[in-house]
Amino acid sequence: MKQDRFLLGILAGIAVLVLVALVVFFARPDNLEYGKETNPEGIARNYIVALHLRDYEKAYTYLAEGENKPTLEEFTQPFLLNYVSPGNAGVEVLESQISGDGASVQLSVLYNPGDPFSGSYRNNEYASLVRQDGQWKIKEMPYTFWYYDWYQEPYEEEKKP
């Protein structure tokens, strides 16, 4: 009898913990809102928010004009095919350093691995921005938010004689 009550107590305790975890999870505030776009930090943050909201058209507007800039379709494909997975990382936008028409934004990126046996880790990385027509635009971001092929010269095979 005592063992049954003890087991029921443990199960009830687990049920309460699960219920509390669910309430905390669903009651937390959603901070995925666009902010001001007046500085490099705001542009970097809004780009990341757009990716998390899967608003790829909006995210594309933050890209700098330049040689070999991807088309909207080329930009969207890596996200749809999971070559780039921004959902696997949390980001805190820290500070920026502006030098003329260029800026570097420090990001603290928390990476979450996809398997249960690896731990998450935090890394400080940088986004590069450039001022074009009076607005800040993104030249490069950390790999979790950026596909390696963008802005690269297209590969052409050498023709054999």
Image: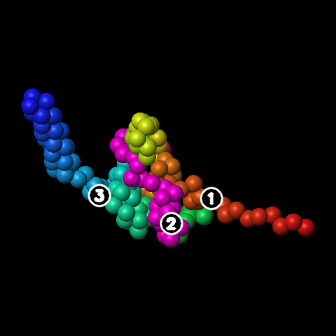
- Disc 1 residue type (three-letter): Gln
Q: Is residue 43 left or right of residue 99?
A: left
- Badge 1 crowding class, 10 Å Cα cut-off, few under 14, some 14 to 19, many 20 or more, is few
State the SS at label 3.
loop
Mark nearer the N terminus (2 vs 3): 3
Place of residue 138 in the rendered image (x, y in percent of width and height, measured from the top left): 47, 55
Residue lying at the far front in this picture: please name it. Answer: 1
- What is the distance, in whole Å, between disc 2 and disc 3 at their CAs? 23 Å
Give the extent of the magenta segment.
72-100
Reading the chain from its start, which is encountered first: label 1 or label 2? Answer: 2
Of the pair 42 and 27, the residue shown nearer to us:
27
For the point 47% across and 43% down, the residue is 126
Asked if the stretch drawn in magenta spans residue 156, the answer is: no
Q: Which tag, 3 or 1, sits closer to the chain's start?
A: 3
Quadrant housing the N terminus: top left
Rendered residue at 36%/45% (across/down) = 90
Report which quarter residue 122 is drawn in.
top left
Residue type at mark 2 is Gln
The image's mark for residue 152 is 1
Q: Decide if residue 97 is in sight here.
A: no
Residue type (three-letter) at the residue carrying disc 3? Tyr
Q: Which residue, as the protein is rendered here, is positioned at the far top?
A: 2
Q: Are marks 1 and 2 in contact (CB under 8 Å)?
A: no
Q: Secondary structure at mark 2?
A: helix
Q: Relative to 4, is 76 above or below? A: below
Circle nearer the viewer, 1 or 2: 2
Label disc, if present, on residue 77 of the rendered structure? 2
Quarter holding residue 57: bottom left
What residue is disc 3 on? Answer: 34
